Amino acid sequence: MSGLLALLDDVAGIAKVAAASVDDVIAQAGKAGAKAAGAVIDDAAVSPKYVQGFSADRELPIIWRIAKGSFKNKLLYLLPAGLALSAFAPWAIPPLLMLGGAYLCFEGAEKVSHVLGWGHAHEDYAGKATVLEDPAHLEEKKAQGAIKTDFILSAEIMTISLAAIPESNFWMEAATLATVAIMITTVVYGAVAIIVKADDAGLAMAAHGRLGLTRALGRGIVKVMPGFMQLLTIVGTAAMLWVGGSIIVHGLEQIGFGWPAHVIHDIAAVIGHAVPSATGTVEWITKAAIDGVLGLALGFVLIPLGEKIITPLWRGVTGAKE
């Protein structure tokens, strides 16, 4: 009997350690995922456009297909690559982060330039073929395009998350990255599904609601959604520029060019101390704003490089027509 009690006590001890490890993984995953906010918000803002033009009954299947592709991108390709980098080439993480940050700056600045009427921002370009396609082929094409875009954003999310994980053993890093991948993909595509179907839900409530309040709420949802989508795009663009700029500044500091980070910190500290009642908040907002402006400036510099050199080379190598 004493042996059984001792065994149960050992099992209870192991369970406590396992529970603590799970708590640590979830806590680290939450912090790491928060660092990737810009790419996550942009992912949620970009994804709904891939179901535009399809019938309502095809929207959720397309989103589910893209979500499965996103899980595959993160867990099968990017997770092993990230762990390999962490184990064998940790020196490569800051440059890769800076490359990803530059990409976020480029994407954000391109969206801003499109609003200002500069450039096409991924829209039609000279020589683009216009072809009528059957719905099944178009759905396949849209889903594959979304999964490819997701790969780029997922790579940025996983790299940022990897850099944010405190130094630990291989299995803790693997579990944390896997948790980040699952949590972020579930949240992003769950939110996308809700956003995409909100109009349909609002129309159904407006047309078939038993109560006047229900019908009014449905009409309100239908009216609000276009503005909400626009707000989501604005927030996503701002987040991309902020995160992209901050990654570049932090990366420069890591490779020995710390003066931009120090100057930004000093400016934020001066402005923050001017508002004693909210010093920390004002400092954070100031730093984020400066990072965002720097990200926008870098993005504007990168637009001609991307449009005139990188994109034509990519189309030449891959034979892409769009």
Image: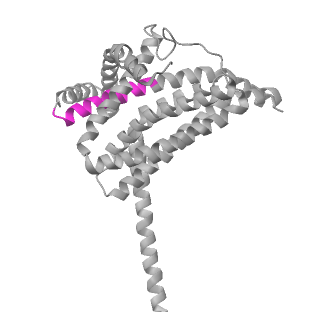
Residue 7 falls in image quadrant: bottom left
Reply above or below: 144 against 108. Answer: below
Above-or-below relation of 223 to 190: above
Magenta residue span: 237-256
Residue 290 place in picture, x, y as percent? 30, 23
Seen from the viewer's position, the closer of residues 169 and 38 is 169
Q: How is the image coloured?
A: one colour
Would residue 245 be counted in the magenta stretch? yes
| Residue 7 visible from this viewpoint | yes
Residue 245, position as x, y percentages in the image = 32, 26
- On screen, residue 54 versus residue 96, left or right, reads right
Rendered residue at 46%/43% (across/down): 74
Front residue of 165/317: it is 317
Q: Residue at x 32, y 49 (%)?
A: 84
Q: Nearer the viewer, residue 317 or 130?
A: 317
Q: Main secondary structure of the magenta part?
A: helix
Residue at 39% from the left image edge and 16% from the top image edge: 312
Quarter of image, res 168: bottom left
The image shows residue 118 at horizontal and vertical percentages of: 43, 8
